[in-house]
Amino acid sequence: MRESRHALIIANDHYDDEGLKKLKAPAQDAEALAGVLEDPQIGDFDVEVVRNAQADVMRRRIQHFFSDRRRDDTLVLHFSCHGLKSESGELYFAARDSEMRMLDATAIPSQFVRTCMSRTRAGRTVLLLDCCYGGAFSRGASVRAAGDVNVLESFRTDKAPGGRGWAVITAADSMEYAFEGPELAEKSSPRPSVFTHAVVEGLRTGEADRDEDGEIRLNELYDYIYERVQDENPNQTPKRTVEMQGDPWLAHSRRGRIKIAAVPSPPFLQSAITSENVVTRLGAVTELDRRLRDDDLPVAEGARQALEEITRNDLGHIADQAHAALQVIHLQPSPASLDFGKVRQGSTPAEKSVMLGGPPLARHCVAQSTQRWLRVDPLPNGFNVAVEADTPGHLTGDIELKGVADESVVHVEVTVEPQVATAPDAPVPGPQEPEDRPKEAVVVHPPASEDQPETLTRETRVTSEPPVSESWPAAEPLEPQPVAEHAEEARSTTKRRQATSPQQPPTKSVRAVVTAAAGLALAAISALYLILAVVGAIKAAEEQQPNVDDIGDRLSSHGVSTSLTVCLVTAVIALLLRVLARHDLSAHPRLYPRQATNAVKSLASSAKVLAVPVLVLAILMAIAYPVISNYL
């Protein structure tokens, strides 16, 4: 039996009761959410939108939505409206005709929604609540209840009702607002709700697909929503409760990256990777470099993962060798842009080819068009690009490439000239995408061998991992004696690759580490000179030197002014070096492995903690110095 997917979106932004604020976001939210949920490339839901309905209409639509469902069905119910609470603290959803003094008769009780959810036979139900619980009433409203309603408690139960289960995700907890844009403002223009906007963007862009397996699952969507809402407004915290077996998928992702089941390195190679002998580990890097270029993709993927682990955890020069070896699997499309020039509307322009360089692992990727007028067809070592010249105008689009460890873009342009010249006063139609064909996504497989390229079929959606071979050729063992030769070969290979690859990313750097360390050292020096200045000032105050009655002269004789000057200069330079180190770290994150990043942050924080109070005290002493010299 085929799974069916249904969504009901309830959006209320106008209310008859003047005691309720008029919301601005629900209409915009409903349109955006309906668009992504009903898109066959994303949610593939059958969507119904109910906007500004009265309470009796809302009840009928909700009960009908949950009725006559099957165990394989997936249901999504979204509320974008006011969340009201009764005097006893019960949760209600506001309808157009809701009256704050008659909530039982004119609003939708949360218990009614929960009862409908418990009676449905649908296997999976997801409830999204974008309701402004704290801001439901206008200033001066008289309906109040002690405390705040706990939204999740209104839907929590000991066991999953009905079918396989349900989940509730709320825009905020019981103590917070659900913000429309950055703030709740009476006269601002309509802006999308922070919560619903995060839901739409996570599904539309595919960024909610955290593991990049081509599917957006419930837990992934919640994690994405939580981070986006917190970034937009730290005072709003989405919450969830789940009474469901497993982690169901809610939408297809357009960001799916190729996944390959890796073959682990053989025991002898794992032993060499963890060896205490530096030369042995260099030989292991060379062997992994060889396996990285293997025609068997699982073997190559296992080598890639091992090299990345070495890059993160091993010593500098060994990590550099592993990092250099990984550059060979970066996506190398040629050409990187396509210009079809001017074509006549309705014609069939010639296709253009894009070839991929590098070993088989670098040529194995997903190629997806960002525009519906672009068509992508796979080739053994690349893909063909064709355009649909149906809409006049200058069209631009991209082919997004996603490999196992890299992403790239091929830019495409074409100018479609109309068949019939338009009248002088007639408006020239702009480029619009046809709605009758989905965007293209194909998998580019490298051929099994260069002599026998395999024939590939065109795919319109990528939702599963590529087939993995069940057997792999055994790798030749490392000889104990020629390990040094492997190391020398690795160094010469790296030099050749660096000389012939002008676009190779820079290797690791210690510049930020050195800068942060210098800043900490200068901060320590500034603290030392501050102590010397304080000691000198104490001695000057206690001593009475012959023929020296002026306190300023006594301070100078003990070197207080010199110590303060050095203290101020070194503290300021220390803070500047700290800022430079953090800037270099954020501007060039790929240059620094995890250990170096942590070291820079630790050194920079220590320099700040030491230099700031020293600088403040030195400034105070510098201000007091002339005052004391003149008046004492």
Image (cartoon, rainbow, N blue to C red):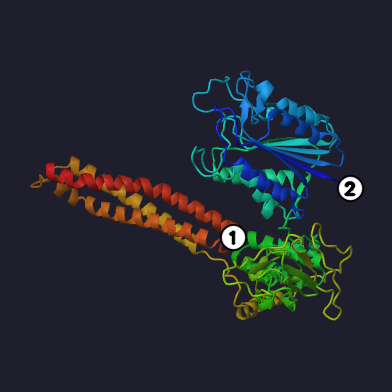
Vertical relation: 162 (above or below) 555: above
For badge 1, the amino acid type reads Pro
Among all residues in the image, which is located at the extreme left? Answer: 547
Residue visible at 85% across and 81% down in the picture: 451
For badge 2, the amino acid type reads Arg
Packing grade of label 1 (10 A; few <14, some 14-19, many >=20) is some
Instruction: Determine whether label 2 and label 1 are within 8 Å by CB.
Output: no
Packing grade of label 2 (10 A; few <14, some 14-19, many >=20) is few
Q: Which residue is mark 2?
A: 2
Left or right of 540? Residue 256 is: right
Q: Position of residue 197 (x, y in %)?
A: 62, 46
Mark before the other along the chain sequence, 2 or 1: 2
Q: Mark 1: which secondary structure?
A: loop
In terms of depth relative to the viewer, which is nearer, 328 or 175? 175
Q: Which residue is mark 1?
A: 593
Q: Is residue 25 visible?
A: yes
In terms of depth relative to the viewer, which is nearer, 461 or 627? 461
Residue visible at 33% across and 49% down in the picture: 615
